[in-house]
Amino acid sequence: MSVAAAPEASEALDAPKAPPAPAAVPPARFSTIVTTVENKPGVLARVAGLFARRGYNIESLAVAATEDHRFSRITFTVDVESSSLEQVVKQLDKLVNVVDIQELDPAESIERELILVTVAVSPSGLGGLLGLADEFRAYVLDADADAMMLSLSARPARLDEFARRLQPYGIIELQRTGRVALRMLGARSAPAPAPAPEPEGPEASP
Amino acid sequence: MSSPEKKLMQMTGGQALVKALEHEGAEVVFGLPGGAILPVYDPIIESPIRHILVRHEQGAGHMAEGYAHATGRPGVAMVTSGPGVTNIVTALCDANMDSVPMVCVSGQVPYPAIGTDAFQECDTTGITMAVTKHNFLVTEAQDIPRVIHEAFHIATTGRPGPVLVDIPKDIVDPNNPRSAMTWYEPSDDDMELPGYRPVTAGDPGAIRAAAGLIAESERPVLYAGGGILKARAADALKELAELADIPVVTTLMARGAFPDSHPLCLGMPGMHGNYAAVTAMQESDLLIALGARFDDRVTGRVDGFAPGAKVIHVDIDAAELGKVRAADVAIRGDCRLVIAELTAALRALGGGGAQPDRRAWRSVISGWQEKYPLVYEQSEPGELLKPQFVMEQLRDLTPDDTIVASGVGQHQMWASQYWTFDHPYTWVNSGGLGTMGFSIPAAIGAKVGMPDRMVWAVDGDGCFQMTAQELVTATVERIPVKVALFNNAYLGMVRQWQEMFYEERYSEVYLSYEVPDYVRWAEAMGCVALRVEAPEEVAPAISKANEIDDRPVVLEFRSEASENVYPMVPAGKTNSEIVVDPSQPDPRRGR
Ligand SMILES: Cc1ncc(C[n+]2csc(CCOP(=O)(O)OP(=O)(O)O)c2C)c(N)n1
Ligand SMILES: [Mg+2]
């Protein structure tokens, strides 16, 4: 079966190519930084500039307004050693528009990302595809005679797995959001109790 | 209708901007007008603020810096959009590297034209983001007083630095209804800076821990950086040093923060520091870094820097703590407050009596001082001047509290080495960025801020050719600075590196003794100018310059081109590999 996806798109997203590879679980050096910033023009550029200046690549980025319209939240995942990360966090803290910074330990936080994917549908593949959607509890958002659009919100690793399993059907288009994260309820006050294992599987309604 | 009183408070954004600068205490603005900033220049005519018209905007920036270095008050510069802004970027970066408080107001094309590639538009906030502490693009005339207040607040608190305020023309232009605003006196309560919370007091537990380390140390060194001057902590430092009997090194940014004549003063450490200062740090068991940032020019190769030393690091900027060298005790806070607390904590531990006897350490250091003093050979008759000799003469023939503003190069190192800085705020230089051309405009700014003090610019021939045009400003504005121009016909510092590290292959470092003719050039700019070629002419020329107080003076000292700055720690080497003057025994052989 031919894969109709734009190859550069799937490459950029690090989606595994056939033949199936193990799911790309981020190594532990990935860190998630959640910043609360003033909701003003140019603030994202200041924050992103700090990383760029030091040659750090931003793995994932999510920006949106918060419950208070004066502030936005920028969530990054970056791939840096802990010593450099400390320096980045301190530099971020110096930005006048940055109000708050939290470093989230992946083991103590819940991370979610959303994938939207359009897959080719053939009469022979339809059953398998619906089965896969069911297994991952993905939603069918749109469909026509030869394609189907699915959505899934889950841990990034689970999205990797989902994308890998969809690959053989022919991914036409795929988009993922940056990840967002919150500290686990049990980890909010120090000293943190051993966190409960992260719940697997589906999220609430689409 | 509004009352006449209320009506009085209506004004344009341009008027409000000038009034806001007055409100912040600005007494002088260095700048140069242009299309986008015209509406702000108009109300300057009525303002008590003195405006100094520069010949190049880089000059305005360095003047604002020199003013701030000498007075401690923020310098103010004003430029137009586009090229006005790009011309001042170097000075902003310089101020950012050396934590100099300044506010730069820049004109911008009208707000609706931003992003259209309008005439003289550039992305000012984008360009200056990385070289300022913070910058603002003001979009409403009504915000001007508040934003100017915020700009001064940010520039002068925490770790000081440059702040740029970009002002679109429409909000200041009286012909545009968008410039209408109602004046208010901005106060701290008006500020909208939820993310800006500078910390000043140090953590008491950490201060006690630091005092404990000091009380146990046998070979401590106080490593004083520019933060001492920014925090106005020179007196506090002296009290601490004397109480605990600890020798002090003053970095290039901290010359004058501790008196050179004081028996505990070791002078400048680092790449061209003196042997005793460099080696005392290297052999120390405790470095007490105060407002210093472990710059590579001080540490040499970091992994071989002061290998046996524990570190106490005090800085107002948390990002400096542990950035280069891990600290055993890191204290975030204002140097003056933390040093005072530290001194109190040491007193509580029993003061000087309760600490190890440091006489042995002191005598080891004096041994180094005696063995490796700064030396140079006097010139033979008929030879050109030795720059070190000229520097000593200048030091000895000028008042004790003379302000010296330096360029960047060999002459800068000789000035720092040979001058005796016994007062804070007498040394103005470009340390972090190393900006050639800094000295003349910085000296002008310092003289404007400190008109009763003698101000000398110590400059190189390369540097002079970068910003000499500001001597026109000095003449026209009657700012009688003096310039000691060390003409060695070379980009001397680069020549020295090519001699030492590139097998004497001299590539593009030769300038010329004769061209330009510095005396005629200086005279053309309205200065009194003298060329000095023989040692016996040096003192009379300096005395003559000292007597002139109605215009700038330039003394061109024809100096020996082959002279090198020693000691020197070659780049990439550890401080233990320090190279001393060739006439002295090589300390590396003993190791
Ligand atoms: C703007 C700028 N360009 C280049 C340099 C690199 N540089 C450092 S010192 C120096 C030579 C300075 O020459 P001069 O002013 O004659 O001083 P000297 O070393 O001869 O005393 C140069 C080119 C610099 N510091 N600044
Ligand atoms: Mg020179």
Image (cartoon, grey):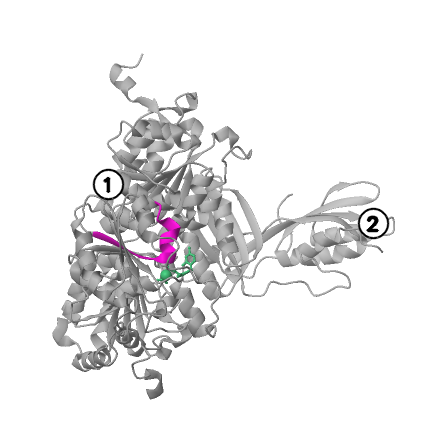
Residue on which the image places disc 1 = B478
Quadrant hosting ligand 1: bottom left
For residue B154, side relative to residue B118 (left or right): left
For residue B388, say whether it is visible.
Answer: yes
Span of residues in magenta: B455-469
Q: Name the image quarter holding the C terminus of chain B.
A: bottom left
Residue A29's tag is none
Residue on which the image places disc 2 = A126
Q: Is residue B459 magenta?
A: yes
For label 1, count other residues whose C-alpha is less than 10 Å away and answer few (under 14), some (14-19) or many (20+).
Answer: some
Q: Are marks 2 and 1 in contact (CB under 8 Å)?
A: no
Indicate the position of residue B518 as horizontal and vertical percent values.
33, 52
Closer-to-camera residue (B29/B536): B536
Q: What residue appears at the point 43 percent right and 60 percent down from the top-left corner?
A: A87
Q: Residue furthest front?
A: B382
Q: What residue appears at the point 48 percent right and 30 percent down from the top-left corner?
A: B111
Kindly indicate whether the residues beneath marks 2 and 1 are on one polypeptide chain.
Answer: no
Q: What residue appears at the point 83 percent right and 49 percent down from the top-left corner?
A: A126
For residue A72, say whether it is visible.
Answer: no
Indicate the position of residue B450 as horizontal and vertical percent values.
20, 47
Q: Residue furthest bottom?
A: B590
Q: Name the image quarter holding the N terminus of chain B.
A: top left
